[in-house]
């Protein structure tokens, strides 16, 4: 499997594959690259509907030129446990970022979340994040404000009174419950429309069915989240003897 940066020809193949409606995995097979490479490439350059090979190649050359011209402000890699492959960790962080973006999280917010998730402490300061992601402190502040508002990141002060940003073990529980409650509000609003539009009319029936569906889904999610919450606080079972 080839390594290194994507060539202009490969980017043209990606664009053709997207135009044909191919899945990322199929495009990856055709250009002999990992699926994660294709996913990152497309999401970094406008997504599947806006991807253009020439613009993507020009942007990649510009990023490479900037990296050669400007020395990084500090070490980019987070401290790693012995035995970890730093390059593999960084590649995984990019993949996780892409997945967060595909689920609807804006790019910078996704990068901050991924960076926090792959740190063992789950807690980093603004300076750490800015250095790691090579962005301005203002970008970090804006991203954290968004994530804090979504309940995905918590702020705290360390012993030196400096602000740190924390990913709690409970973050997915809180996020799922908040999302389900938001959906319940949509269901309630839909149900209000039944009285406005007149019971028995096609529009009212459509809204009533929508409300019943959203009620069922939301209540099921909240119930399942409550039942599974302890999983977030349970240490994984050790692998069997001899397992890699």
Image (cartoon, rainbow, N blue to C red):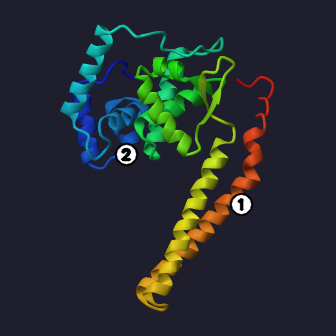
Image vertical order of residue 120 relative to residue 173, above or below: above
Q: Which one is nearer the viewer's eye here, 233 or 142?
A: 142
Question: Mark 1 packing: few (<14 Cα in 10 Å), some, or many (20+)?
Answer: few
Q: Which one is nearer the viewer's eye here, 24 or 2?
A: 24
Q: Quadrant of the N terminus?
A: top left
Image vertical order of residue 73 relative to residue 197, above or below: above
Picture residue at 59% right of the left edge, 26% below the top: 118
**Image check: 214 left or right of 196?**
right
Q: Would you say the residues marked 2 and 1 are in contact, meaning their CB atoms lie under 8 Å apart? A: no
**Image check: 236 left or right of 219?**
right
Q: Which one is nearer the viewer's eye here, 167 or 205?
A: 167
- SS state under label 1: helix
Say which of marks 2 and 1 sits in front: 1
State the image coordinates of residue 145 (x, y, percent, origin top left). Answer: 50, 38
Q: Quadrant of residue 172?
A: top right
Picture residue at 55% right of the left edge, 63% below the top: 183
Q: Quadrant of residue 10?
A: top left
State the image coordinates of residue 136 (x, y, percent, origin top left). Answer: 40, 22
Question: Mark 2 packing: few (<14 Cα in 10 Å), some, or many (20+)?
Answer: some
- SS state under label 2: loop
Residue reaching furthest to the left: 54
State the image coordinates of residue 54 (x, y, percent, origin top left). Answer: 18, 31
The residue that label 2 is drawn on is 23
Residue reaching furthest to the front: 161
The residue that label 1 is drawn on is 223
Between marks 2 and 1, how big is the CA–CA gap? 34 Å
Q: Which mark is residue 2?
A: none
Picture residue at 44% right of the left edge, 41% below the top: 101
Which one is earlier in the sequence, the residue at label 2 or at label 1? 2
């Amino acid at each position: 499997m080839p390594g290194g940066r994507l060539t202009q020809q490969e980017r043209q193949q990606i664009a053709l594959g997207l135009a044909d409606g191919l899945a990322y995995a199929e495009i990856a097979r055709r250009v002999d690259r990992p699926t994660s490479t294709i996913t990152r490439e497309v999401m970094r350059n406008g997504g599947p509907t806006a991807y253009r090979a020439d613009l993507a190649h020009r942007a990649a050359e510009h990023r490479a030129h900037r990296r050669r011209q400007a020395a990084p402000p500090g070490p980019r890699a987070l401290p790693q446990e012995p035995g970890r492959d730093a390059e593999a960790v960084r590649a995984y962080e990019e993949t996780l970022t892409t997945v967060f973006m595909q689920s609807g999280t804006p790019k910078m917010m996704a990068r901050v979340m991924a960076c926090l998730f792959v740190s063992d402490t789950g807690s980093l300061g603004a300076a750490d994040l800015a250095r790691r992601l090579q962005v301005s402190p203002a970008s970090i502040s804006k991203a954290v404000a968004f994530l804090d508002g979504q309940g995905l990141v918590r702020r705290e002060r360390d012993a030196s009174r400096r602000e740190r940003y924390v990913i709690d073990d409970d973050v997915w529980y809180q996020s799922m419950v908040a999302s389900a409650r938001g959906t319940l509000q949509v269901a309630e609003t839909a149900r209000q429309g039944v009285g406005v539009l007149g019971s028995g009319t096609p529009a009212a029936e459509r809204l009533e069915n929508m409300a019943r569906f959203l009620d069922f889904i939301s209540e099921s999610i909240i119930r399942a989240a409550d039942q599974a919450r302890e999983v977030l606080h349970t240490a994984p079972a050790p692998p069997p003897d001899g397992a890699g």
